[in-house]
Structures are given as C-alpha cells and as structure tokens.
Amino acid sequence: MATLLPTSTAGSLPKPSWLAEPEVLWSPWKLEGEGLVEGKQDALRLALHEQRHAGIDIVSDGEQSRQHFVTTFIEHLNGVDFNQRETVTIRNRYEASVPSVVGEVSRQQSVFVEDARFLREQTDQPIKWALPGPMTMIDTLFDGHYKSREKLAWEFARALNEEARELEAAGVDVIQFDEPAFNVFFDDVNDWGIATLERAIEGLKCETAVHICYGYGIKANTDWKKTLGSEWRQYEAVFPKLQKSNIDIVSLECQNSHVPMELIELIRGKKVMVGAIDVANHAIETPEEVAATLRKALEFVDADNLYPSTNCGMAPLPRHVARGKMQALSAGAAIVRKELEG
Ligand SMILES: [Zn+2]
C-alpha cells in the first residue's frame, strides 16, 4: 500500500432506512425484485461515497447487498436447507435458529462477484471484500450430514476459495475472512481452523486478511465480554500459529478492549489492521483517542505494517454515528502519519 497507515473499516456499514430496518441484524429488505437489485446498488454507491468523504483509504461495499455476513454466503450453497431449522448455540454464547446442512455442500454460482465488479467500476481506490471464514460458517449451522466440524470446514474452504479467486479476478485488492470463532475454539483453530483458512486463500495473489473480533455491539456479545475478566488473552492462543500462516493481514479489536496490546508482538511480521474504533457504543472517538491507540500499537507493529481500522463492522449503529467514527479514524490516523513523517 503506497499510503502510510492506510485506513479501512472492518466491513459492514449501516444500511439506509429505505433499504432495510436500521440498527438490527438480519433486517428484512424493504424492497423486492428489480427495485431491490437497484436499491442495493444505490446503497453501495452511498456507502462508498461516505467512506471516501470520511477519507477512508481502502474502501468496501459496506456489505450493503447482504442481510448478514455469514448467512448470505451460505444461502448460495447447495446442501444447506434454510427451511429445516435447528436451534444451536453460536460461539458458545447465544442460541439461534439456524439452517441445516442436509447434503454435500458446494457453491452453485458466484455469490458476490457481480457486486465486487460493480464496486470496482465506481472507484480507483484499493478495495477490500469480506467473506465469512470456514470455522465461523460451520458455527452458524446445524450439520446433519457430515457430522464433523472439521470435514464441513474443509468443504466450505473449497467453496470460499472458488469465490475468492473470482473476486480477485474482478479486481479486489484485499480479501478478508471474518473468523470471530477463532476467539472461542482455540484447539480447533490450531488443529484445523488455520489450515482450512489457508485452503480458502490457496493460489491467491491479492492480499488476504483474517478478521478476529469480539463481535458486533449486540447484547449477547457485550454480556459475554463481561465474563472475560480484566485481561482478554484469547488472541494469545492462536497468534503463534497464525504468525506462521500464509495470511498477510490480521484484523484485530484494540479500541476500549481489554486485549493487552503486547500480544500483537506474537504476530510480528504480519500486517495488522488495528481496531481503533469501538463499535459497541455510540460515542464517537476523538481523533486524539484514535491516535493514542495507534501509537500504542506502533510499539509492537512496524509502521508500514499498521493499518488503522475499526474493531468490527458498524451495521448495527445509527448512520450518523458510523460516519462520525469513520471521520475520527481518518483524523486520528492523519495525526500519527504526520508524526511518523515529521
Ligand atoms: Zn468483527
């Protein structure tokens, strides 16, 4: 990346209220048919405009065309029945009614490639595209077919790799895999989680990222965080193996988090997307607060490997809050950039 400290968001941005109910996850669309297709593209244009206006360097679609960061990808796979629902506990945290794996899973067709092409046409800036990671996908489903989390993860990794190769061909610069499950199932992450992620990025020449967070600012997550104690050392369990993996970038939650910043030392050599914006509250950080987090991170990551970002997606936030937070991120990064260049 030519820019020092290039900024980006972790992924999702709020949708306009004419497209979907604001501030809720899995919000139903308010449009249908051709109107919905057009509405999603218009929302993508707006999301891009707001990122550029806020000075974000690596832009995304703000996930405007998907209802949810995991489910929308799964909807396009064979072998998953959305009518056959079972209740499972997601990330050992909250119960949800989820679809069932009923047969061999495979990708029917491109899922996001058209949307990525559309975004590519709108901007010359570097673009980042988020996909769910294999482990987070299996954790959002009931598996009545493979009956093996690992086996299913390898199948998903293959489907993700097909999608990722097409996204790369469409001109995506950074492909990011969202793996909040990496913060929960440490043994599985080390046994096969990172390996399946590497299968998902096989053959890619564009940059690849893994986003490991403590989740959206929803109640189930904030309640869980209260049980984690004063120091969150979850990253410590998976960083050593991640450091040796082929993944280029690791995206982390650092703002208002109880993660000891020195854990970043364990992935020295990787590019680090440092979450310097808290998505779990509506208070907009000051540029100085953002700068302070970035300066702290600079003790453990080289400046040309530091990518200022948000802790997680901002889909559940009011739009004006998300806008303010993106502006704060840019302004905070600008302060530190000036210090480094000065
Ligand atoms: Zn996240």
Image (spheres, helix red, strand yellow):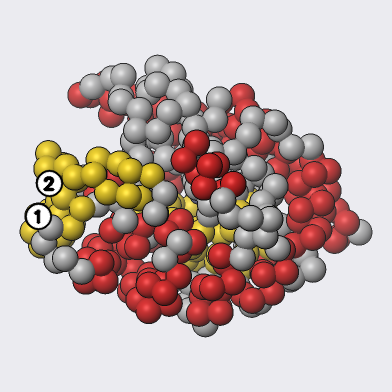
Indicate the secondary structure of the residue bearing disc 2. strand
- In the displayed structure, would residue 269 be above or below residue 280? below
Please tell me which residue is depicted at 77% across the width and 65% down the height of the picture.
Answer: 298
Which amino acid type is marked by label 2? Asp
- In the displayed structure, would residue 241 be above or below residue 178? below
In the foreground, 156 or 147:
147
In the foreground, 109 or 320:
320
In the foreground, 24 or 222:
222
Numbered badge on residue 216: none
The quadrant in which the C terminus is found is: bottom right
Please tell me which residue is depicted at 23% across the width and 44% down the height of the picture.
Answer: 87
Q: Position of residue 129 (x, y in %)?
A: 43, 52
As drawn, is 206 to the left or to the right of 100? right
- Proximity of marks 1 and 2: CB atoms separated by less than 8 Å: yes
In the foreground, 114 or 211:
211
Which amino acid type is marked by label 1? Val
Q: Position of residue 92 (x, y in %)?
A: 39, 54
Looking at the image, the residue that sits furthest to the right is 342
Indicate the secondary structure of the residue bearing disc 1. strand
User: Label 1, on which residue?
Assistant: 102
Crowdedness near tag 1: few (<14), some (14–19) or many (≥20) residues, C-alpha within 10 Å: some
Q: Position of residue 296 (x, y in %)?
A: 79, 60
Task: Name the quadrant containing residue 302.
Answer: bottom right
Q: Position of residue 88 (x, y in %)?
A: 27, 49
Numbered badge on residue 81: 2
Q: CA distance from mark 1 to mark 2?
A: 6 Å
